[in-house]
Amino acid sequence: MNKTPVSTRLCREEYIDIRIVLITVVIIGSIVGNAIICLLLIRFKTLRTVPNLLVANLAFIDILNAMTNMPLMIMWYICKMSFLKGRFISWFIVSWYVFFYVSVFNLTVLTMDRYGALVHGFRYHSWKTMHKAKISVVCVWLLAVAYTYGMFILGLSIDLGDAPVLIYRTQYLMKFGKHFIIPGYLVPFTIMLILGGIICFTVHRHSKHILPFTSRTKKVKSDVETAKTIGLTCAAFFCMGVFPILLHNFATIHDTWIHFLAFFLTHLNSMMNPVIYPLKTRR
């Protein structure tokens, strides 16, 4: 993966301004959009439900990602700041990818919540509590931290002297990236697809047995919309999560538009999430 030597020129690549503007737009959009989600949940107590707690956690993660990984990407990937080099600085910068895994794992838990609500109905609603939701949020963070730093501990043994971050990152991907990064996205995506398929099957089966204009018609229609939203979530996660990871395998030359697109789509997910969140938790 990414075996081609990389350029270390400082902010001199072609189309540099366009790339900086694109990332800057995503930074602003991510912070503003996700901040609105958080403020709404703080302002209105009626919105403080179990799924919305998970939504708030995702929004908080996206804000942190926009304030750390995105500016750092401009510095180490696009502009290649000369002071961002060396073993420990490179490890420290790349390890901020922990926010990606917190987001992925939390998104999986949110899909599980919708699965429980739509497939198991009353039994799930009587079981879930805000306390359990808070525990799940803590577990998501602990799991993501353990997974990310457990993976990058393998990179502590790589010593390339004062090589730039981009070269260190290339070595990380060659040594352990394919064993951790790809499964870290593909496994949650598979879980989401399976749960989404069960949800769609359950909703379709229920809709066939409900006569029009009955008291349950409105609820079934709401379930159908939720199932469609889960399908949209899986599609968005593939386009802005799984697909960029796969692009990294094909974009063997750094500084190309394909390689930049892989990074950009991953960050774009943070700006698009505030649009998907309200659809996901309408009930």
Image: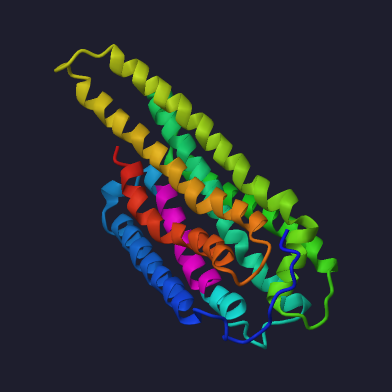
Q: Is residue 10 magenta?
A: no
Please state, as top left, top right, bottom left or bottom right, where the N terminus lies in the image: bottom right
Left or right of 272 on screen, residue 159: right
Q: Is residue 100 visible?
A: yes
Above-or-below relation of 202 to 58: above
Please state, as top left, top right, bottom left or bottom right, where the C terminus lies in the image: top left
The residue drawn where x is 36% and y is 42% is 280
Which image quarter: residue 28? bottom left
Left or right of 248 on screen, residue 125: left
Which residue is most to the left? 213
Which image quarter: residue 11? bottom right
The residue lying toward the viewer, choosing from 193 and 132, is: 193
The residue lying toward the viewer, choosing from 229 and 119, is: 229
Q: Position of residue 158 (x, y in %)?
A: 83, 69
Q: Position of residue 69 (x, y in %)?
A: 55, 69
The residue drawn where x is 27% and y is 31% is 222
Above-or-below relation of 208 to 90: above
Q: Is residue 123 visible?
A: no
The residue drawn where x is 49% and y is 35% is 112
Left or right of 79 on screen, residue 128: left
Above-or-below relation of 12 to 64: below
The residue lying toward the viewer, choosing from 166 and 159, is: 166
Q: Position of residue 3 (x, y in %)?
A: 76, 64
Secondary structure mainly formed by the magenta segment: helix
The residue drawn where x is 52% and y is 59% is 266
Region rendered in magenta: 53-70
Q: Is residue 64 magenta?
A: yes
Q: Position of residue 250 (x, y in %)?
A: 65, 55
Left or right of 97 on screen, residue 177: right
